[in-house]
Amino acid sequence: MGNVADNLARLEERICAAAERAGRARSGIKLVAVTKTVSAERVNEAIDAGITAIGENRVQEARDKWPFLKGEVERHLIGRLQRNKAGKAVELFDMVESVDRPALAEALSKRALNAGRKLPILVEVNISGEASKAGVEPSALRGLIEEVADLPGIQVQGLMTIGPMTGEEGIIRGAFRELRRIADELSCETPPGMEMKWISMGMSGDFEIAIEEGANIVRVGSAIFGDRN
Ligand SMILES: *Cc1c(COP(=O)(O)O)cnc(C)c1O
């Protein structure tokens, strides 16, 4: 599995090199350490080594693990969320990256309002068109944002995608470039209530391509914590 601090140091070098290739500043890229299936002890090692944001896929796992974390970190929900867990998600997370339908946005807004906060969300886009993937189709994205952006309990702050399941760099790059193009379009004609601030794309296998194509959030798990097997 390797030492978390060493893995992080190597990851940092690769993030910086990719940023440099793209003429971008490292400070403009948020690293979210994906901690699904990782023990609280190892997450704490990452926090000790300087990680400031973590991502979990499941509300229940976050709820079980987080009492054992030490230190303040930003907490992102990056996995599929059922509407009946919206309240728990609002309690536990600073941002929900995986909103892909109006009913979920409405449930989150209602729960966030009850909790007296405005929850930042990203809209997950199915760029690759793979049937197994969550996310709204690109053609339905603007409609979805227009439908939810003025809900009082949430703020739409950008887009998230999961890269295509392939080893072919050209296909991955094309998908990330397309999300970037859509984000640029939205940042010029932004639906009222939205702020086009974050492009979340890139995981352990493809974060360098994502950074080169404009990601400002990367979500990296196994390159930090080892394979989940
Ligand atoms: C698991 C996961 C990641 C991290 O994947 P790695 O390949 O381990 O870096 C990123 N984003 C989402 C949505 C995930 O489910």
Image: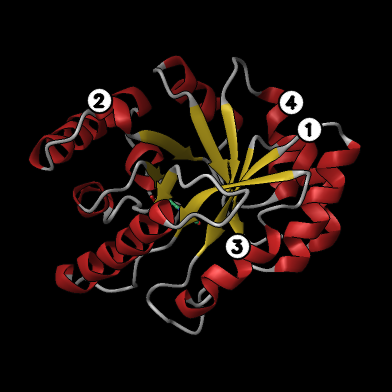
The residue that label 2 is drawn on is 9
Vertical placement of residue 69 versus 213, above or below: above
Residue at 39% over, 35% down:
31
Q: Residues within 10 Å of mark 1 (few under 14, many from 20)?
A: some
Check disc 1 and report the residue beneath it: 117
Position of residue 26 measured from the top left corner of the image (x, y, whole percent): 24, 28
Q: Is residue 8 left or right of residue 96?
A: left
Q: Amino acid at mark 2?
A: Ala
Secondary structure type for disc 2: helix
Cα–Cα span, label 1 and label 4: 22 Å
Q: Earlier in the sequence, mark 1 or mark 4?
A: 4
Q: Are marks 3 and 2 in contact (CB under 8 Å)?
A: no
The local crowd at label 4, few if under 14, some if 14 to 19, many if 20 or more residues have their Cα within 10 Å, is few
Residue named by callout 4: 67
Q: Can you give x and y, in whole percent of width and height, for residue 55 in the image? A: 54, 41
Q: Nearer the viewer, residue 36 or 72?
A: 72
In this view, the mark in front (2 or 1): 1
Is label 1 in a helix, a strand or a loop?
A: loop
Q: Residue furthest right?
A: 114
Amino acid beneath label 4? Pro
**Position of residue 40 measured from the top left corner of the image (x, y, whole percent):** 60, 30
Residue under label 3: 145
**Other residues around mark 2 within 10 Å, as few (<14) / some (14–19) / many (≥20):** some
